[in-house]
Amino acid sequence: MAKFSFETAVDIQAPQEQVYNYVADFPRHTEWNHQPQQMTPLTSGPTRVGSQYKTEEDMPSNMPTMQKLMFRVMMPVLKMMHKFEGYTVAEITALEPNERVAWTAHMPNKQGKKLMQMHWELRMQGENGATKVIQRCEIDPPADSPFIKMVNEDAAKTTEAESTANLARLKSVVESRTNQ
């Protein structure tokens, strides 16, 4: 089974509570994370464990050009063959104030079956008014996923590099808010 994980980190010059409040506001992920282009709540009420968001995503910005081209050509065919919706569903699995935000993102087909799945976590550690943010990811496709052959070490490295760039954007956004 293809299963990969990685961890990236960044130091942000902002209080831990401020960083947590920003990343726990889930729709704001579109401001610092390259892939989600739009997040629409699927559950009503305040954000909580179990809240779900329909997430329309782009490809990783650092994906090689030939892979991007292949995906753009193949996605309509794959959507039709595997009857998937073309979006992911992100479900919050942990909200630990000032310490941790976690979620699982999966790509459903029209019958609700998970075709791809990833587990994400952001941990915050404060020290002297600054915050270290550690992002963990586990790429965990179902064994019968039509995308299983695409989950390999190169794909994991592309996702890890994109996550590192996303954390740099998170740092920039949060620090710019701190300095206002």
Image (spheres, rainbow, N blue to C red):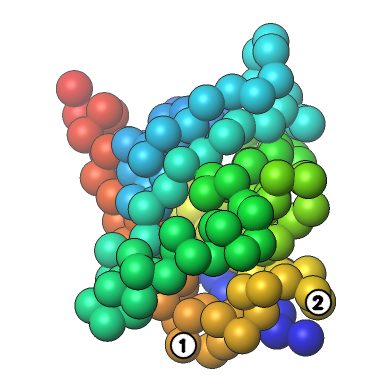
Q: Amino acid at mark 1?
A: Asp
Label 2 crowding class (10 Å Cα cut-off): few <14, some 14-19, many 20+?
few
Q: Is residue 91 visible?
A: yes
Residue 100 lies, in percent from the top left, at 65, 43
Q: Quadrant of residue 129?
A: top left
> In the rendered structure, are the residues bearing label 2 and label 1 in contact, judged by CB atoms less than 8 Å apart?
no
Q: Secondary structure at mark 2?
A: loop
Residue located 59% across and 46% down the image: 85
- Residue 105 is marked as none
Nearer to the camera, 143 or 5: 143
Q: Quadrant of the C terminus?
A: top left
Q: Secondary structure at mark 1?
A: helix
Report the Cα–Cα distance between label 2 and label 1.
19 Å
Q: Residue at label 1?
A: 154
Q: Quadrant of residue 76?
A: bottom left
Residue located 77% across and 86% down the image: 1
Outermost residue, top side: 45
Residue 153 in the figure: left or right of residue 161 = right
- The disc, 2 or 1, on the residue closer to the chain's N-terminal end is 2
Whether residue 11 is situated above or below residue 39 in the rendered picture: below
Nearer to the camera, 180 or 114: 114
Q: Is residue 64 visible?
A: no
Q: Amino acid at mark 2?
A: Ala
Q: Residue at label 2?
A: 143
Residue located 42% across and 70% down the image: 74
Whether residue 73 is situated above or below residue 57 in the rendered picture: below
Residue 145 lies, in percent from the top left, at 72, 71
Q: Quadrant of residue 140?
A: bottom right
